[in-house]
Image: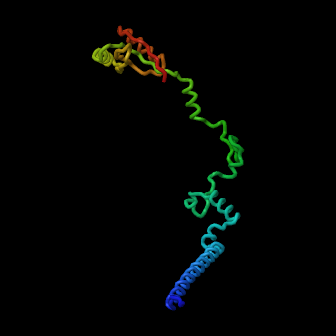
Amino acid sequence: MKSNTSPSFKTNNTQKGGTLVGFILGMVVGLLIALSVAIYVTKVPIPFLNKGLSRSADQDAAEEKKNKDWDPNAPLYGKNPVKSAVDPEKEKTPSGVLPPPDANNPPASAEGTDPLGDLARSKAGADPFNYYVQAGAFRTPEEAESQRAKLSLNGYDAKVSEREQGGRSVFRVRIGPFDTREDAEKIQDKLKSNKVETALVRIQR
């Protein structure tokens, strides 16, 4: 009995089998190539990346010191450092201790006059108060001005000053100031002889 399989059918089966085997072999070869490339890339150093990451301990220490000593105002100083304004010889002198007097500049003679000292002594012995002769205190400025006018007619230079007393304004008529109590008492005695009520007022200078 003869087989029904024809030669053309056998040829088609052979071609299909060869195509499948070739596809599988191509995939295997592609995977091997991809694996080889991956291994190569992981083992070969990357120039730019390793250059930035591979830093020695000395370089790290130098960078840290540079950052620590960095002064943002350095460009303002210029090329020449600023000299200290303090004289090194003066720095050697202890604080609060004056250097010995220079032989070329002897101290001033004690026999010379001291005008400022004499003036200070004269002021120290002067009376620390100013004296006024008060010729009345009034409730209204008109009354005070009237009293001041009367005193002016008699040759006295009087002034009116206002002060609050007990919640009310008081207008005082005073003559002065006088440097000594004796001068104020002389004016007071003259006013009393003219029957003017007076009071002696003393104010700290």
Q: Is residue 62 above or below residue 166?
A: below
Instruction: Identify the residue at image location x=54%, y=27%.
Output: 123
Q: Is residue 60 above or below residue 162?
A: below
| Viewer-side residue, 41 vs 124 | 41
| Viewer-side residue, 37 vs 99 | 37
Instruction: Identify the residue at image location x=64%, y=57%.
Output: 68
Q: Position of residue 110 (x, y in %)?
A: 66, 36
Q: Position of residue 99 (x, y in %)?
A: 70, 45
Q: Is residue 100 left or right of residue 76?
A: right
- Residue 89 seen anywhere in this rendered image of the structure: yes
| Viewer-side residue, 62 vs 77 | 62
Picture quadrant where residue 18 is located = bottom right
Q: Quadrant of the N terminus?
A: bottom right
Picture quadrant where residue 124 is located = top right
Instruction: Identify the residue at image location x=59%, y=81%.
Output: 25
Q: Is residue 161 above or below residue 79?
A: above
- Residue 103 seen anywhere in this rendered image of the structure: no
| Viewer-side residue, 145 vs 165 | 165
